[in-house]
Image (cartoon, coloured by chain):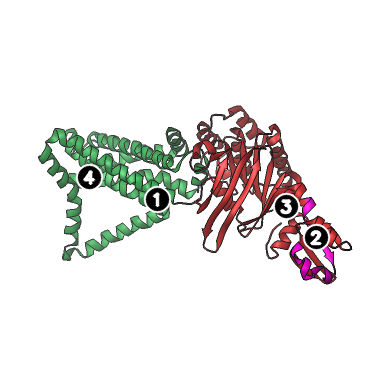
Chain colours: A green, B red
Amino acid sequence: MIKLMRRGFIQHKKIILSIGILGPVYMGYFGSRINNILLLMVFCGFLYGIMPLILFARDDKFKADAFGLSLPVTRREYIGSRYLLSWALMLFLFLAGSLLMILVPGGKLTAAMVFNPRLMLITLAFLTVNFGCLMPLFVRIGQVGLLAFLIGLQVLGVLLMVFRNIGSLAVVKKLFHLIPDGITAVQSALGLALAFPVLLAVLALLTYVSFEISVALFRRKEF
Amino acid sequence: MDAALEVTGLRKSYKGFALKDVSFAVPQGTIMGLVGPNGAGKTTTIKVILNLVRRQAGTVKVFGLDNRIEEKAAKIRIGFVHETPAMIEDIPLRDIAAATAPFYPKWDAQLCEGLLREFELPAGKKFKQLSHGMKMKFSLALALCHGADLLILDEPTSGLDPVFRRELLERLSAVIQDGRKAVLFSTHITSDLERTADYVTLMLNGKVVFSSTRDEIRDGWAVVKGGREILEPSRRSLFRAVRETPYGVEALTADAPAARSAFPSAVFDRASIEEIMLFLNPGASHD
Protein backbone atom coordinates (compact mmCIF):
# COMPACT_ATOMS: atom_id res chain seq x y z
CA MET A 1 0.00 0.00 0.00
CA ILE A 2 2.87 2.38 0.85
CA LYS A 3 4.47 1.59 -2.51
CA LEU A 4 1.22 2.48 -4.25
CA MET A 5 0.94 5.72 -2.29
CA ARG A 6 4.51 6.58 -3.19
CA ARG A 7 3.72 5.81 -6.81
CA GLY A 8 0.65 8.04 -6.63
CA PHE A 9 2.70 10.83 -5.15
CA ILE A 10 5.41 10.57 -7.83
CA GLN A 11 2.87 10.43 -10.65
CA HIS A 12 0.80 13.34 -9.41
CA LYS A 13 3.37 15.39 -7.53
CA LYS A 14 2.87 18.57 -9.55
CA ILE A 15 -0.89 18.46 -9.04
CA ILE A 16 -0.49 17.57 -5.35
CA LEU A 17 1.82 20.53 -4.88
CA SER A 18 -0.52 22.86 -6.76
CA ILE A 19 -3.53 21.73 -4.74
CA GLY A 20 -1.48 21.80 -1.54
CA ILE A 21 -0.58 25.45 -2.09
CA LEU A 22 -3.59 26.91 -3.88
CA GLY A 23 -6.22 25.03 -1.84
CA PRO A 24 -5.29 26.44 1.58
CA VAL A 25 -4.61 29.91 0.14
CA TYR A 26 -8.04 29.99 -1.44
CA MET A 27 -9.75 28.67 1.70
CA GLY A 28 -7.73 31.03 3.86
CA TYR A 29 -8.98 34.00 1.87
CA PHE A 30 -12.54 32.66 1.58
CA GLY A 31 -12.66 31.83 5.30
CA SER A 32 -11.45 35.26 6.29
CA ARG A 33 -14.34 36.90 4.40
CA ILE A 34 -17.27 34.76 5.42
CA ASN A 35 -19.73 35.41 8.24
CA ASN A 36 -21.69 32.16 8.26
CA ILE A 37 -19.43 29.61 9.96
CA LEU A 38 -21.70 26.65 9.12
CA LEU A 39 -21.60 27.57 5.44
CA LEU A 40 -17.82 27.68 5.71
CA MET A 41 -17.73 24.18 7.23
CA VAL A 42 -19.98 22.80 4.48
CA PHE A 43 -17.89 24.47 1.81
CA CYS A 44 -14.63 23.16 3.30
CA GLY A 45 -16.06 19.65 3.46
CA PHE A 46 -17.19 19.89 -0.15
CA LEU A 47 -14.04 21.46 -1.60
CA TYR A 48 -11.50 19.32 0.26
CA GLY A 49 -13.49 16.17 -0.57
CA ILE A 50 -13.28 16.86 -4.29
CA MET A 51 -9.56 17.70 -4.43
CA PRO A 52 -8.16 14.13 -4.28
CA LEU A 53 -10.46 13.05 -7.07
CA ILE A 54 -8.58 15.42 -9.37
CA LEU A 55 -5.57 13.11 -8.98
CA PHE A 56 -7.43 9.92 -9.75
CA ALA A 57 -9.25 11.55 -12.64
CA ARG A 58 -5.80 11.76 -14.24
CA ASP A 59 -5.45 7.97 -14.03
CA ASP A 60 -8.81 7.77 -15.72
CA LYS A 61 -7.91 10.37 -18.34
CA PHE A 62 -4.65 8.66 -19.30
CA LYS A 63 -6.12 5.15 -18.93
CA ALA A 64 -3.23 4.38 -16.60
CA ASP A 65 -5.12 1.94 -14.37
CA ALA A 66 -4.47 -1.04 -16.65
CA PHE A 67 -0.72 -0.63 -16.18
CA GLY A 68 -1.20 0.06 -12.46
CA LEU A 69 -3.15 -3.13 -12.02
CA SER A 70 -0.60 -5.17 -13.93
CA LEU A 71 1.84 -4.40 -11.10
CA PRO A 72 2.01 -6.89 -8.23
CA VAL A 73 -0.89 -5.39 -6.30
CA THR A 74 -4.45 -6.38 -5.51
CA ARG A 75 -7.44 -4.23 -6.34
CA ARG A 76 -8.13 -3.84 -2.63
CA GLU A 77 -4.66 -2.37 -2.11
CA TYR A 78 -5.07 -0.16 -5.15
CA ILE A 79 -8.23 1.41 -3.73
CA GLY A 80 -6.81 1.39 -0.19
CA SER A 81 -3.85 3.48 -1.32
CA ARG A 82 -6.24 5.96 -2.93
CA TYR A 83 -8.11 6.37 0.34
CA LEU A 84 -4.90 6.84 2.31
CA LEU A 85 -3.45 9.33 -0.16
CA SER A 86 -6.75 11.20 -0.26
CA TRP A 87 -7.02 11.44 3.51
CA ALA A 88 -3.42 12.58 3.83
CA LEU A 89 -4.12 15.32 1.30
CA MET A 90 -7.50 16.28 2.76
CA LEU A 91 -6.17 16.51 6.33
CA PHE A 92 -3.30 18.65 5.14
CA LEU A 93 -5.71 20.96 3.29
CA PHE A 94 -7.97 21.07 6.33
CA LEU A 95 -5.19 22.03 8.73
CA ALA A 96 -3.34 24.40 6.40
CA GLY A 97 -6.60 26.03 5.23
CA SER A 98 -7.80 26.50 8.82
CA LEU A 99 -4.49 28.01 9.82
CA LEU A 100 -4.53 30.48 6.94
CA MET A 101 -8.11 31.52 7.73
CA ILE A 102 -6.90 33.06 10.98
CA LEU A 103 -3.63 34.38 9.58
CA VAL A 104 -5.09 36.35 6.69
CA PRO A 105 -4.94 40.05 7.68
CA GLY A 106 -8.34 41.56 8.30
CA GLY A 107 -10.01 38.16 8.70
CA LYS A 108 -13.13 37.78 10.82
CA LEU A 109 -12.26 34.40 12.32
CA THR A 110 -10.20 33.83 15.42
CA ALA A 111 -8.15 30.77 16.34
CA ALA A 112 -10.69 29.90 19.02
CA MET A 113 -13.45 29.88 16.40
CA VAL A 114 -11.62 27.92 13.72
CA PHE A 115 -10.01 25.36 16.00
CA ASN A 116 -13.12 24.87 18.07
CA PRO A 117 -13.37 21.06 18.48
CA ARG A 118 -17.06 21.02 17.69
CA LEU A 119 -16.63 23.00 14.46
CA MET A 120 -13.64 20.91 13.46
CA LEU A 121 -15.71 17.81 13.98
CA ILE A 122 -18.54 19.23 11.90
CA THR A 123 -16.14 20.03 9.06
CA LEU A 124 -14.61 16.57 9.30
CA ALA A 125 -18.09 15.06 9.24
CA PHE A 126 -19.03 16.98 6.09
CA LEU A 127 -15.72 15.99 4.57
CA THR A 128 -16.18 12.31 5.46
CA VAL A 129 -19.72 12.15 4.13
CA ASN A 130 -18.83 14.06 0.97
CA PHE A 131 -15.69 12.07 0.15
CA GLY A 132 -17.27 8.82 1.33
CA CYS A 133 -20.07 9.28 -1.21
CA LEU A 134 -18.00 10.73 -4.06
CA MET A 135 -15.23 8.11 -4.08
CA PRO A 136 -17.44 5.05 -4.77
CA LEU A 137 -19.29 7.13 -7.32
CA PHE A 138 -16.01 8.05 -8.98
CA VAL A 139 -14.88 4.40 -8.99
CA ARG A 140 -18.18 3.41 -10.59
CA ILE A 141 -18.63 6.13 -13.20
CA GLY A 142 -15.18 7.65 -13.66
CA GLN A 143 -14.24 11.25 -14.23
CA VAL A 144 -16.76 12.00 -16.95
CA GLY A 145 -19.57 10.52 -14.90
CA LEU A 146 -18.48 12.42 -11.83
CA LEU A 147 -18.34 15.66 -13.75
CA ALA A 148 -21.86 15.01 -15.04
CA PHE A 149 -22.97 14.27 -11.48
CA LEU A 150 -21.48 17.53 -10.16
CA ILE A 151 -23.09 19.51 -12.99
CA GLY A 152 -26.34 17.75 -12.10
CA LEU A 153 -25.95 18.98 -8.52
CA GLN A 154 -25.47 22.53 -9.79
CA VAL A 155 -28.62 22.27 -11.86
CA LEU A 156 -30.44 20.89 -8.83
CA GLY A 157 -29.21 23.87 -6.81
CA VAL A 158 -30.61 26.28 -9.40
CA LEU A 159 -33.92 24.40 -9.46
CA LEU A 160 -34.10 24.59 -5.67
CA MET A 161 -33.66 28.35 -5.88
CA VAL A 162 -36.34 28.61 -8.55
CA PHE A 163 -38.83 26.56 -6.56
CA ARG A 164 -37.98 27.95 -3.15
CA ASN A 165 -41.52 29.24 -2.73
CA ILE A 166 -42.73 25.65 -2.37
CA GLY A 167 -40.32 25.03 0.48
CA SER A 168 -37.53 23.22 -1.37
CA LEU A 169 -34.78 25.28 0.28
CA ALA A 170 -36.10 24.45 3.71
CA VAL A 171 -35.65 20.74 2.94
CA VAL A 172 -32.03 21.31 1.88
CA LYS A 173 -31.34 23.44 4.95
CA LYS A 174 -32.72 20.65 7.12
CA LEU A 175 -30.45 18.16 5.34
CA PHE A 176 -27.37 20.32 5.93
CA HIS A 177 -28.32 20.80 9.58
CA LEU A 178 -28.58 17.05 10.11
CA ILE A 179 -24.83 16.74 10.75
CA PRO A 180 -24.35 19.64 13.23
CA ASP A 181 -27.64 18.77 14.96
CA GLY A 182 -26.58 15.13 15.23
CA ILE A 183 -23.21 16.11 16.65
CA THR A 184 -24.89 18.42 19.16
CA ALA A 185 -27.21 15.61 20.20
CA VAL A 186 -24.33 13.17 20.73
CA GLN A 187 -22.40 15.82 22.66
CA SER A 188 -25.36 16.47 24.95
CA ALA A 189 -25.82 12.80 25.57
CA LEU A 190 -22.17 11.82 26.13
CA GLY A 191 -20.37 15.03 27.05
CA LEU A 192 -17.61 16.58 24.91
CA ALA A 193 -14.78 14.37 26.21
CA LEU A 194 -16.52 11.14 25.23
CA ALA A 195 -18.44 12.47 22.24
CA PHE A 196 -15.29 13.49 20.39
CA PRO A 197 -13.69 10.00 20.15
CA VAL A 198 -17.07 8.34 19.59
CA LEU A 199 -17.88 10.66 16.69
CA LEU A 200 -14.41 10.22 15.22
CA ALA A 201 -14.93 6.46 15.38
CA VAL A 202 -18.25 6.87 13.58
CA LEU A 203 -16.52 8.90 10.85
CA ALA A 204 -13.83 6.22 10.55
CA LEU A 205 -16.54 3.59 10.24
CA LEU A 206 -18.27 5.60 7.51
CA THR A 207 -14.97 5.84 5.65
CA TYR A 208 -14.46 2.09 6.01
CA VAL A 209 -17.94 1.39 4.62
CA SER A 210 -17.23 3.74 1.71
CA PHE A 211 -13.90 1.94 1.13
CA GLU A 212 -15.56 -1.48 1.06
CA ILE A 213 -18.16 -0.24 -1.42
CA SER A 214 -15.40 1.23 -3.61
CA VAL A 215 -13.45 -2.05 -3.50
CA ALA A 216 -16.56 -4.03 -4.47
CA LEU A 217 -17.25 -1.65 -7.36
CA PHE A 218 -13.62 -1.61 -8.48
CA ARG A 219 -13.52 -5.42 -8.55
CA ARG A 220 -16.27 -5.34 -11.14
CA LYS A 221 -14.37 -2.95 -13.40
CA GLU A 222 -12.57 -4.22 -16.46
CA PHE A 223 -9.57 -2.60 -18.10
CA MET B 1 9.23 -29.23 -18.95
CA ASP B 2 7.37 -27.34 -16.20
CA ALA B 3 4.88 -24.77 -17.36
CA ALA B 4 5.56 -21.09 -16.85
CA LEU B 5 1.94 -20.38 -17.68
CA GLU B 6 -1.04 -22.71 -17.64
CA VAL B 7 -4.39 -21.48 -18.87
CA THR B 8 -7.25 -23.93 -18.44
CA GLY B 9 -10.88 -23.68 -19.51
CA LEU B 10 -11.16 -19.90 -19.65
CA ARG B 11 -14.61 -18.57 -20.36
CA LYS B 12 -15.61 -14.98 -20.71
CA SER B 13 -18.67 -13.60 -22.44
CA TYR B 14 -19.32 -10.20 -23.85
CA LYS B 15 -22.22 -9.15 -25.99
CA GLY B 16 -21.44 -10.66 -29.37
CA PHE B 17 -18.19 -12.32 -28.32
CA ALA B 18 -17.09 -15.09 -25.99
CA LEU B 19 -13.95 -16.91 -24.98
CA LYS B 20 -14.84 -20.59 -25.10
CA ASP B 21 -12.81 -22.97 -22.93
CA VAL B 22 -9.48 -21.45 -23.82
CA SER B 23 -6.65 -23.71 -22.69
CA PHE B 24 -2.93 -23.74 -23.40
CA ALA B 25 0.37 -23.98 -21.57
CA VAL B 26 3.66 -22.15 -22.11
CA PRO B 27 6.59 -24.35 -21.01
CA GLN B 28 9.58 -22.73 -19.32
CA GLY B 29 12.37 -21.84 -21.73
CA THR B 30 10.05 -21.28 -24.66
CA ILE B 31 8.34 -18.53 -26.61
CA MET B 32 4.70 -18.91 -27.48
CA GLY B 33 3.00 -16.85 -30.11
CA LEU B 34 -0.70 -16.26 -29.59
CA VAL B 35 -2.01 -15.65 -33.04
CA GLY B 36 -5.34 -14.91 -34.58
CA PRO B 37 -7.19 -12.28 -36.55
CA ASN B 38 -8.51 -9.13 -34.91
CA GLY B 39 -11.29 -10.00 -32.51
CA ALA B 40 -10.16 -13.59 -32.02
CA GLY B 41 -9.83 -13.17 -28.24
CA LYS B 42 -6.05 -12.76 -27.83
CA THR B 43 -6.16 -9.52 -25.86
CA THR B 44 -9.06 -10.70 -23.71
CA THR B 45 -7.13 -13.86 -22.86
CA ILE B 46 -4.09 -11.80 -21.87
CA LYS B 47 -6.23 -9.48 -19.79
CA VAL B 48 -7.70 -12.45 -17.93
CA ILE B 49 -4.17 -13.71 -17.23
CA LEU B 50 -3.42 -10.32 -15.64
CA ASN B 51 -6.80 -10.09 -13.87
CA LEU B 52 -7.65 -6.96 -15.80
CA VAL B 53 -10.96 -8.50 -16.78
CA ARG B 54 -13.08 -10.98 -14.88
CA ARG B 55 -13.72 -14.48 -16.14
CA GLN B 56 -16.77 -16.68 -15.92
CA ALA B 57 -14.76 -19.88 -15.58
CA GLY B 58 -11.28 -21.31 -15.81
CA THR B 59 -7.93 -21.11 -14.05
CA VAL B 60 -4.65 -19.36 -14.76
CA LYS B 61 -1.45 -20.51 -13.12
CA VAL B 62 1.83 -18.63 -13.34
CA PHE B 63 4.69 -20.91 -12.32
CA GLY B 64 2.08 -22.94 -10.41
CA LEU B 65 0.64 -19.87 -8.66
CA ASP B 66 -3.06 -19.25 -9.10
CA ASN B 67 -3.37 -15.72 -10.46
CA ARG B 68 -6.40 -14.93 -8.31
CA ILE B 69 -5.50 -16.60 -5.02
CA GLU B 70 -1.81 -15.68 -5.14
CA GLU B 71 -2.22 -12.60 -7.31
CA LYS B 72 0.75 -10.59 -6.07
CA ALA B 73 3.18 -13.51 -6.06
CA ALA B 74 2.08 -14.40 -9.59
CA LYS B 75 2.26 -10.85 -10.93
CA ILE B 76 5.68 -10.21 -9.46
CA ARG B 77 6.99 -12.78 -11.94
CA ILE B 78 5.24 -11.21 -14.93
CA GLY B 79 6.49 -8.42 -17.17
CA PHE B 80 3.66 -7.00 -19.24
CA VAL B 81 3.64 -4.89 -22.37
CA HIS B 82 0.21 -3.58 -23.32
CA GLU B 83 -0.78 -3.25 -26.98
CA THR B 84 -1.30 0.50 -26.44
CA PRO B 85 0.92 1.42 -23.50
CA ALA B 86 -0.92 3.92 -21.32
CA MET B 87 0.68 5.69 -18.39
CA ILE B 88 0.41 9.12 -16.82
CA GLU B 89 1.53 11.14 -19.80
CA ASP B 90 2.84 14.37 -18.35
CA ILE B 91 5.67 12.97 -16.25
CA PRO B 92 9.18 12.00 -17.35
CA LEU B 93 10.19 8.42 -17.98
CA ARG B 94 12.59 8.46 -15.03
CA ASP B 95 9.64 9.19 -12.71
CA ILE B 96 7.60 6.35 -14.16
CA ALA B 97 10.54 4.01 -13.64
CA ALA B 98 11.08 5.32 -10.09
CA ALA B 99 7.40 4.78 -9.28
CA THR B 100 7.48 1.25 -10.69
CA ALA B 101 10.77 0.01 -9.23
CA PRO B 102 9.71 -0.55 -5.58
CA PHE B 103 7.14 -3.15 -6.59
CA TYR B 104 9.82 -5.53 -7.81
CA PRO B 105 12.51 -6.91 -5.50
CA LYS B 106 14.68 -7.89 -8.48
CA TRP B 107 14.54 -4.43 -10.09
CA ASP B 108 17.90 -3.63 -11.67
CA ALA B 109 18.36 0.15 -11.86
CA GLN B 110 21.57 -0.12 -13.86
CA LEU B 111 19.96 -2.41 -16.39
CA CYS B 112 17.06 0.05 -16.61
CA GLU B 113 19.38 2.96 -17.35
CA GLY B 114 21.23 0.84 -19.90
CA LEU B 115 18.04 -0.19 -21.65
CA LEU B 116 16.78 3.37 -21.85
CA ARG B 117 20.08 4.35 -23.45
CA GLU B 118 20.04 1.37 -25.77
CA PHE B 119 16.48 2.08 -26.86
CA GLU B 120 17.35 5.78 -27.26
CA LEU B 121 14.78 6.89 -24.71
CA PRO B 122 15.87 10.05 -22.86
CA ALA B 123 14.94 9.58 -19.19
CA GLY B 124 13.88 13.21 -18.89
CA LYS B 125 11.42 12.99 -21.77
CA LYS B 126 7.74 12.93 -20.92
CA PHE B 127 5.68 9.88 -21.82
CA LYS B 128 3.38 11.97 -24.02
CA GLN B 129 6.34 13.05 -26.13
CA LEU B 130 7.02 9.48 -27.23
CA SER B 131 5.77 7.94 -30.45
CA HIS B 132 3.81 4.67 -30.26
CA GLY B 133 6.94 2.70 -31.08
CA MET B 134 8.92 4.48 -28.37
CA LYS B 135 6.15 3.86 -25.85
CA MET B 136 6.34 0.19 -26.75
CA LYS B 137 10.12 0.25 -26.22
CA PHE B 138 9.71 1.95 -22.85
CA SER B 139 7.11 -0.60 -21.73
CA LEU B 140 9.42 -3.36 -22.81
CA ALA B 141 12.32 -1.79 -20.92
CA LEU B 142 10.21 -1.65 -17.74
CA ALA B 143 9.22 -5.29 -18.19
CA LEU B 144 12.85 -6.33 -18.66
CA CYS B 145 14.23 -4.25 -15.77
CA HIS B 146 12.70 -6.38 -13.04
CA GLY B 147 13.93 -9.68 -14.43
CA ALA B 148 10.44 -10.99 -15.14
CA ASP B 149 10.26 -14.77 -15.47
CA LEU B 150 7.28 -14.57 -17.77
CA LEU B 151 7.01 -11.84 -20.36
CA ILE B 152 3.54 -11.21 -21.70
CA LEU B 153 3.38 -8.91 -24.67
CA ASP B 154 0.19 -7.91 -26.40
CA GLU B 155 0.84 -7.11 -30.06
CA PRO B 156 4.34 -5.83 -29.26
CA THR B 157 5.47 -5.51 -32.85
CA SER B 158 2.58 -3.44 -34.17
CA GLY B 159 3.72 0.08 -34.90
CA LEU B 160 7.41 -0.77 -34.69
CA ASP B 161 9.84 -0.16 -37.50
CA PRO B 162 11.26 -3.33 -39.11
CA VAL B 163 14.70 -2.84 -37.54
CA PHE B 164 13.48 -2.63 -33.99
CA ARG B 165 10.90 -5.32 -34.66
CA ARG B 166 13.70 -7.72 -35.50
CA GLU B 167 15.73 -6.53 -32.51
CA LEU B 168 12.76 -7.10 -30.25
CA LEU B 169 12.25 -10.63 -31.50
CA GLU B 170 15.96 -11.35 -31.03
CA ARG B 171 15.77 -9.96 -27.51
CA LEU B 172 12.84 -12.22 -26.74
CA SER B 173 14.89 -15.19 -27.91
CA ALA B 174 17.71 -14.08 -25.60
CA VAL B 175 15.36 -13.82 -22.62
CA ILE B 176 14.55 -17.52 -22.62
CA GLN B 177 18.14 -18.72 -22.95
CA ASP B 178 18.42 -19.70 -19.28
CA GLY B 179 15.68 -22.28 -19.80
CA ARG B 180 13.53 -21.02 -16.92
CA LYS B 181 11.90 -17.96 -18.36
CA ALA B 182 9.16 -17.85 -20.94
CA VAL B 183 7.48 -15.42 -23.30
CA LEU B 184 3.90 -15.21 -24.48
CA PHE B 185 3.24 -12.69 -27.18
CA SER B 186 0.14 -12.07 -29.19
CA THR B 187 0.30 -10.97 -32.76
CA HIS B 188 -1.56 -11.07 -36.00
CA ILE B 189 1.69 -10.72 -37.94
CA THR B 190 2.42 -14.33 -38.69
CA SER B 191 5.94 -13.71 -39.97
CA ASP B 192 6.96 -12.76 -36.41
CA LEU B 193 6.01 -16.24 -35.26
CA GLU B 194 7.89 -18.07 -37.96
CA ARG B 195 11.00 -16.20 -36.88
CA THR B 196 10.76 -16.60 -33.14
CA ALA B 197 8.05 -18.75 -31.62
CA ASP B 198 8.67 -22.28 -30.35
CA TYR B 199 4.95 -22.79 -29.78
CA VAL B 200 2.01 -21.31 -31.60
CA THR B 201 -1.52 -21.05 -30.28
CA LEU B 202 -4.06 -20.11 -32.90
CA MET B 203 -7.28 -18.51 -31.75
CA LEU B 204 -10.35 -17.94 -33.85
CA ASN B 205 -13.67 -16.57 -32.65
CA GLY B 206 -12.76 -17.01 -28.99
CA LYS B 207 -11.63 -20.63 -29.37
CA VAL B 208 -8.21 -22.24 -29.46
CA VAL B 209 -7.84 -24.02 -32.80
CA PHE B 210 -4.50 -25.53 -31.87
CA SER B 211 -1.64 -25.02 -29.47
CA SER B 212 1.39 -26.83 -30.82
CA THR B 213 5.09 -26.61 -31.53
CA ARG B 214 6.13 -25.16 -34.85
CA ASP B 215 7.40 -28.62 -35.87
CA GLU B 216 4.04 -30.19 -35.10
CA ILE B 217 2.32 -27.55 -37.20
CA ARG B 218 4.80 -28.06 -40.06
CA ASP B 219 4.40 -31.84 -39.98
CA GLY B 220 0.70 -32.01 -39.26
CA TRP B 221 -0.93 -29.27 -41.27
CA ALA B 222 -0.92 -29.17 -45.05
CA VAL B 223 -2.86 -27.84 -48.01
CA VAL B 224 -4.02 -30.60 -50.34
CA LYS B 225 -4.58 -29.60 -53.95
CA GLY B 226 -6.46 -31.78 -56.37
CA GLY B 227 -9.64 -32.42 -58.30
CA ARG B 228 -13.13 -32.60 -56.83
CA GLU B 229 -12.65 -36.34 -56.25
CA ILE B 230 -10.64 -35.60 -53.09
CA LEU B 231 -13.87 -34.40 -51.50
CA GLU B 232 -15.56 -37.80 -51.53
CA PRO B 233 -17.68 -38.12 -48.37
CA SER B 234 -15.81 -41.08 -46.80
CA ARG B 235 -12.60 -39.05 -46.59
CA ARG B 236 -14.08 -35.57 -46.12
CA SER B 237 -13.38 -35.76 -42.38
CA LEU B 238 -9.64 -35.43 -43.12
CA PHE B 239 -10.19 -31.79 -44.03
CA ARG B 240 -10.73 -28.86 -41.72
CA ALA B 241 -11.65 -26.44 -44.49
CA VAL B 242 -12.08 -26.51 -48.23
CA ARG B 243 -12.04 -23.88 -50.93
CA GLU B 244 -12.72 -24.24 -54.58
CA THR B 245 -10.51 -22.60 -57.16
CA PRO B 246 -10.85 -22.33 -60.96
CA TYR B 247 -8.38 -25.20 -61.23
CA GLY B 248 -9.82 -27.62 -58.69
CA VAL B 249 -10.03 -27.90 -54.94
CA GLU B 250 -7.74 -26.84 -52.12
CA ALA B 251 -8.31 -28.39 -48.73
CA LEU B 252 -6.68 -27.85 -45.36
CA THR B 253 -5.80 -30.89 -43.31
CA ALA B 254 -4.49 -31.15 -39.77
CA ASP B 255 -3.34 -34.72 -40.39
CA ALA B 256 -0.94 -34.50 -43.31
CA PRO B 257 0.41 -38.11 -43.06
CA ALA B 258 -3.11 -39.59 -43.22
CA ALA B 259 -4.05 -37.30 -46.09
CA ARG B 260 -0.88 -38.27 -47.98
CA SER B 261 -1.74 -41.96 -47.84
CA ALA B 262 -5.38 -41.25 -48.71
CA PHE B 263 -4.54 -39.09 -51.71
CA PRO B 264 -1.19 -40.25 -53.09
CA SER B 265 -1.63 -38.40 -56.35
CA ALA B 266 -2.65 -35.04 -54.85
CA VAL B 267 -0.26 -32.13 -54.49
CA PHE B 268 0.69 -31.24 -50.90
CA ASP B 269 1.91 -27.82 -49.78
CA ARG B 270 3.12 -26.90 -46.36
CA ALA B 271 0.44 -24.89 -44.58
CA SER B 272 1.81 -21.68 -43.15
CA ILE B 273 0.13 -20.19 -40.11
CA GLU B 274 -1.24 -17.45 -42.31
CA GLU B 275 -2.62 -20.02 -44.70
CA ILE B 276 -4.29 -21.88 -41.84
CA MET B 277 -5.81 -18.64 -40.57
CA LEU B 278 -7.12 -17.78 -44.02
CA PHE B 279 -8.62 -21.22 -44.52
CA LEU B 280 -10.32 -21.33 -41.15
CA ASN B 281 -11.43 -17.73 -41.08
CA PRO B 282 -11.74 -16.59 -44.66
CA GLY B 283 -13.40 -13.27 -43.80
CA ALA B 284 -10.71 -12.20 -41.33
CA SER B 285 -8.34 -9.32 -41.95
CA HIS B 286 -4.73 -9.72 -41.00
CA ASP B 287 -1.27 -8.85 -42.23
The chain that hosts pointer 4 is: A
Using the rendered image, report if marks 3 and 4 lie on a common chain.
no
**Tag 4 secondary structure:** helix
Residue where numbered disc 4 is placed: A40
Disc 3 and disc 4: Cα gap in Å?
Answer: 64 Å
Residue where numbered disc 2 is placed: B223
The chain that hosts pointer 2 is: B
Residue where numbered disc 1 is placed: A217
**Tag 2 secondary structure:** strand
Magenta stretch, residue numbers: B218-240
**Tag 3 secondary structure:** helix
User: Can residue A114 be found in the magenta stretch?
Assistant: no
Residue where numbered disc 3 is placed: B190
- Lower sequence index among marks 4 and 1: 4
10 Å crowding of disc 2: few (<14), some (14-19), many (20+): many
Please state which of the two labelled residues, at mark 4 or mark 2, is closer to the viewer: 2
**Tag 1 secondary structure:** helix
Name which quarter of the figure residue A173 lies in.
bottom left
Using the rendered image, report if marks 4 and 1 lie on a common chain.
yes
Name which quarter of the figure residue A56 lies in.
top left
Q: What amino acid is found at the position of numbered circle 4 in the picture?
A: Leu
